[in-house]
Amino acid sequence: MSADLVPKLHTLEEVYAPASQEQETQRWNALQSKFSEVYGRVADFIARAPGRVNLIGEHVDFVGYSVFPAAIDKDILMAAALIPGKVGDLLQVTLHNVSPRFATTVFACDIHNPSSVQLTHEGNTRWANYFKVALQGLQPHLPSEALSQGSGQLLVLVDGSVPPESSLSSSAAMTICSSIVVLTALGAHDRVPRKEMTEVAIESERLNEAFAFVVSNTLVASDKKVSGPVQYNLRVVETRLAAALLAQALGVDADVPNLKPSYRNTLRAVADAYFATQPKAWETLLQSQEIKTTHDTLGNEASQLQAMLLLVDKHIPRTGLTREELENKLQLTSDAFHEKFLSAFPVRADQFFLHARATHVYSEAQRVLKFKALCDQANTAEQIDIQAIYAKLGSLMNESHESLRINYDCSCPELNAVVEIARKHGSLGSRLTGAGWGGCAVHLVPFDHLPSILDALTREYYQAKFPNLDKEQLANALFATQPAQGACVYTEN
């Protein structure tokens, strides 16, 4: 099996951890039975895409740094079958969901013309847009023989266990699963690599079964349309301003041509430009014992991030800066400042806290590298102290949350509450995951502490704050998981 292709699996033992196999077997059997009931025939295959939780690395991906996600066992399943049509005919897609919340949708498209797929922006059929955008995005990558099969009826039944709006990437799972259905139905599964299907390939090593991750959804949602100008959007602008101020101080051009356009003039771009164009300055920085030690233990990239943290301390004020102060420092008129930094989306702020935001980005990017190095060590070393490895992973997760809480200022009382409860009852590491200001926290938990942590979170958070939650709602909000199999296609043979 090529590592570049979505794997084809034939048993659920290859998909789920032992603890969840009985429950998932019942779910998959129910999905296949429901497909036969709805469509009057058996499914050809089932596509699966997991939700994912970001173990570490928050608010650094949009400037070009890596994150460390893990697939979880909650997932999106799509049972599907293609009834071939005549060459040149349209492809009619029928999407049915096992949940009555989502209305059945039928639409036709010309597989040769992505613009023939019309998105729906109102009503309870909007969920079908995930499938539609997958069709649109894949079309340029489909080989001619797949396009020639793009007619007839594509029948799909969807079942999802990833809670929506929970920072567990339910929308990404829907889009990826839809892409797998299209590729498999059109016979192009082995022609389009994963890297063409999704920009970021997520690979998670299975961790020692003595530990699990607990995901706790605070059930607090942050509406980006309402809060964006003072939260998410503002943080993006602050990191861009920090990059501009740092680039000016270091004398570099951060419009790095070999980076994606969206990563240019970011903190990542400043670092890349600085180390590429000023090797003597880097040699001088390497004389620092702190940077040299990081270089010797973690390598070049991690040590350069350590250097950037020192440069942030040196060149960016720790206090908040007003717009007028920034215009003066960057030598921009008010109109030019607005056009360069404030025109993309609305923000509101009296002061911009650039030192704290830049400190978070560079330190969080370095924590991702440290986390990966520990996982690599656990997977490759002949003799390891696994307890010590997990303790260090937990410490990195705790450091991440504190940076997100203080430097990036994107936590909230509810997130801090579940983090503190979990730590108090034995979590090795707990942190918010996702954009913040609500959503989920993730906790690294030894199995022998799992019951007490789940019980404590239930009593001290959910029953106290949401006393009317039923068992199903609680199970969707609070659950244990282990890093799971990634996206796949399931066939009987």
Image: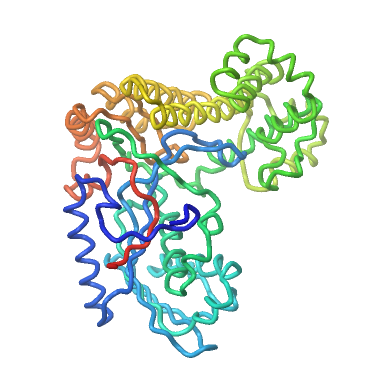
Left or right of 321 in this view: 196:
left
* Quarter of the C terminus within the rendering: bottom left
Q: How many marks?
A: 0
Left or right of 76 in this view: 346:
right
- Picture residue at 48% right of the left edge, 65% below the top: 190
- Picture residue at 40% right of the left edge, 57% below the top: 7
Name the one closer to the observer, 108 or 200: 200
* Quarter of the N terminus within the rendering: bottom left
Name the one closer to the observer, 256 or 425: 256
Name the one closer to the observer, 398 or 125: 398
- Picture residue at 37% right of the left edge, 73% below the top: 95
The extreme front residue here reads: 382
The structure's colour scheme is rainbow
The extreme bottom residue here reads: 86
| Displayed quadrant of residue 48 | bottom left
Residue 110, position as x, y percentages in the image: 55, 81
- Picture residue at 59% right of the left edge, 27% below the top: 362
Left or right of 357 in this view: 466:
left
Considering only vertical position in the picture, is 306 above or below 195? above
Considering only vertical position in the picture, is 60 above or below 355? below
Residue 34, position as x, y percentages in the image: 22, 72
| Displayed quadrant of residue 432 | top left
Residue 271, position as x, y percentages in the image: 69, 30
Residue 289, position as x, y percentages in the image: 62, 9
